[in-house]
């Protein structure tokens, strides 16, 4: 995902206050006794854990594929050739991430299409419900919407085996395009402050839809939901799930501020 920064600082939006990087944030709450200190070969001996990881990689892979399709389509809304090329570059990065995930699923003996299929309908519905009506809405979705998903996967990654965690965090690495989205949106608001209100409402809608879809998908996949509440790994308990969503909401508020919008 191209917008993995959870705490944008300054116009680039790719860092965090105090200089805390993505890797440090991801490992700050890492499980130091359970699965997180094992590699895939050891952790995957647990069939329920293996099923949870296949679900996770399948969901993430389809998310990357859908993002590629969406960004390629949104490029048609770009006002200039430079903007069109930038969005096309973002789409290309998403597809490269998809290929890494598809390759990993095949490597561990899983059918990538079968792993993605359970999540396709929900993700397609999310994109249908949040289709941007113009260029700026498309940028907001790329920056804010995808970042919410990235935050969720980063939280989960702290409780994965070392091999899977490295893959997930690598896929979520910012490709440097978030600064482009921030610059364009802030520039549009400065040129016409009235745009800010509409975009703030749009970002709030994205937040609600993204969290709703994430909760629905997890609820329908037993192994994945067990991972989140600590039934598969020494992961989250139910209280921690609530704190996780609070952290995601806080990161969203910071992104809104980076864009010059009210949360």
Image (cartoon, grey):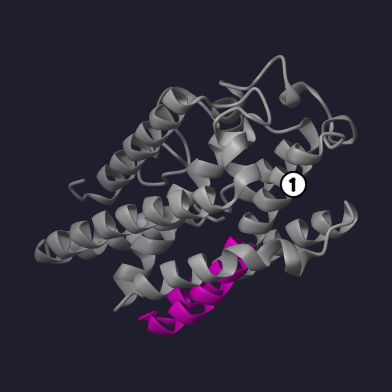
The image position of residue 77, as x and y in percent, is 38, 82
Q: Identify the image quadrant of residue 169.
A: top right
Q: Nearer the viewer, residue 65 or 91?
A: 65
Q: Residue furthest bottom?
A: 76
Q: Nearer the viewer, residue 167 or 242?
A: 242
In this view, 36 is above or below 50: above
* Residue found 62% across the figure and 64% down from its top: 118
Q: Is residue 89 visible?
A: no
Location of the N terminus (image quadrant): bottom right
Q: Is residue 236 left or right of residue 32?
A: left
- Tell whether position 79 is magenta: yes
Q: Is residue 234 left or right of residue 90?
A: right
Residues in magenta, as a range: 62-89
In this view, 142 is above or below 86: above
Location of the C terminus (image quadrant): top left
- Tell whether position 24 is magenta: no
The image position of residue 260, as x and y in percent, is 22, 49
The image position of residue 61, as x and y in percent, is 66, 60
Residue position marked by numbered label 1 in the rendering: 51
Q: Nearer the viewer, residue 99 or 34?
A: 34
Q: Is residue 100 left or right of residue 11?
A: right
Disc 1 is placed on an element classified as helix
């Amino acid at each position: 995902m191209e917008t993995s920064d959870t705490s944008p600082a300054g116009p680039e939006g790719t860092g965090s206050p105090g200089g805390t990087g993505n890797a440090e944030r991801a490992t700050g709450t890492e499980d130091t006794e359970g699965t997180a200190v094992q590699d895939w070969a050891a952790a995957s001996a647990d069939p329920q854990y293996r099923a949870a990881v296949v679900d996770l990689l399948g969901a993430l892979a389809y998310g990357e594929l859908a993002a590629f399709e969406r960004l390629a389509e949104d490029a048609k809304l770009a006002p200039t050739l430079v903007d069109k090329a930038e969005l096309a570059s973002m789409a290309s990065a998403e597809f490269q991430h998809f290929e890494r995930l598809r390759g990993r699923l095949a490597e561990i003996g899983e059918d990538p299409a079968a792993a993605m299929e359970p999540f396709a309908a929900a993700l397609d519905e999310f994109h249908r419900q949040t289709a941007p009506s113009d260029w700026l809405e498309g940028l907001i979705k790329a920056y804010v919407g995808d970042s919410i998903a990235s935050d969720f996967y980063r939280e989960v990654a702290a409780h994965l085996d070392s091999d899977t965690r490295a893959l997930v965090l690598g896929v979520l690495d910012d490709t440097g395009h978030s600064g482009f989205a921030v610059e364009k949106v802030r520039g549009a608001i400065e040129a016409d402050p009235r745009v800010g209100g509409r975009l703030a409402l749009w970002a709030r809608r994205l937040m609600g839809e993204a969290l709703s879809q994430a909760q629905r998908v997890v609820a329908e996949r037993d192994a994945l939901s067990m991972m989140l509440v600590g039934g598969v790994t020494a992961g989250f308990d139910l209280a921690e799930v609530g704190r996780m969503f609070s952290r995601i909401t806080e990161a969203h508020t910071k992104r809104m501020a980076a864009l010059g919008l009210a949360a």
